[in-house]
Amino acid sequence: MKRAERHYALVDLLRGVRRPWSAARLAAHFEVSPRTIERDVAALQAAGVPLYADHGAAGGYSILREYSLPPLNLTAAESLAVLAGLGLLESSPYQAAALRASAKIHAVMLDEHRAPVLETLGMIRVIDAVAPSDTEPVPLGMLSDAIAARRVVRLRYLGEDADGQPDRAPSTVREVETMGLLRAGDSWLLAGWCRLRDAVRGFRIERITELEILDEVAPPRDPSVWEEDLARWPTRRLG
């Protein structure tokens, strides 16, 4: 039985039993070593499967009975494309979700695809935008949470001088009604209605040095305001 097939079978087995199964019993059932079962369990847990270890004489592994692992049959090229795309998101506001999703793909990837996919993935390099050296970047996940909840944020932002140098310009504090995210060149930008400028603005994430999510939900605004601003560049919508 292949590794991915065993993962599905392991989840289905534990969903259907009333009591935990020990690693030794699972190993005998699947005709593998207890160490292999432990590795399988660790991979499934890393992918977000709610597997639990119960200790004691009657202990073993169990799972939430209503949980099931959906089928995911990707070709090697599809696995590579998904992992590469998720890797790009590791420097985005969706960093944490991308890492979790990547772990899930690794957990269900077919054994014969694993080596060639990882070898090709290792040949891909990304040059990310670098934050100013004297600042600490804000937690990226906060931005995606704020946008999803349509919250107003207060941020400290490093602008740039006439020569385009952010370290020579003073920082400003802005209240921004979040609208969405933009990927422009090598940077992610938070787009929103800037109350200081009374207009739509984009804020490069690596220049945001402080971020506070306020309790206020952004008031409704005509979506054409953002669309008109975006019309200045060739953009495409995801999804």
Image (spheres, rainbow, N blue to C red):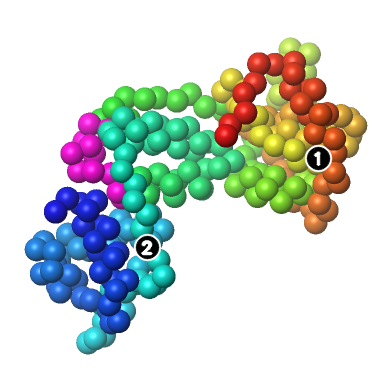
- 17 in relation to 169, above or below: below
By secondary structure, the bulk of the magenta-drawn segment is best described as: helix
Q: Identify the image quadrant of residue 183.
A: top right
Image quarter of the N terminus: bottom left
How far across and how far down the image is residue 191, in percent?
A: 73, 33
Q: Is residue 18 magenta?
A: no
Q: Amino acid at mark 2?
A: Ser
Q: Nearer the viewer, residue 167 or 47?
A: 47
Q: Nearer the viewer, residue 13 or 199?
A: 13
- In the picture provided, is 123 more to the left or to the right than 38? right
Q: Residues within 10 Å of mark 1 (few under 14, many from 20)?
A: many
- 163 in relation to 157, above or below: above
Q: Which residues are magenta?
A: 106-118
Q: Nearer the viewer, residue 144 or 156?
A: 144
Give the residue displayed 28% in from the left and 33% down from the top: 76
Q: Which label's residue is closer to the chain start, 1 or 2?
A: 2
Mark 1 lies on residue: 176
Q: Nearer the viewer, residue 122 or 66?
A: 66
How far across and how far down the image is residue 120, in percent?
A: 28, 27
How far across and how far down the image is residue 153, in percent?
A: 77, 46
Give the residue displayed 83% in from the left and 53% down from the top: 216
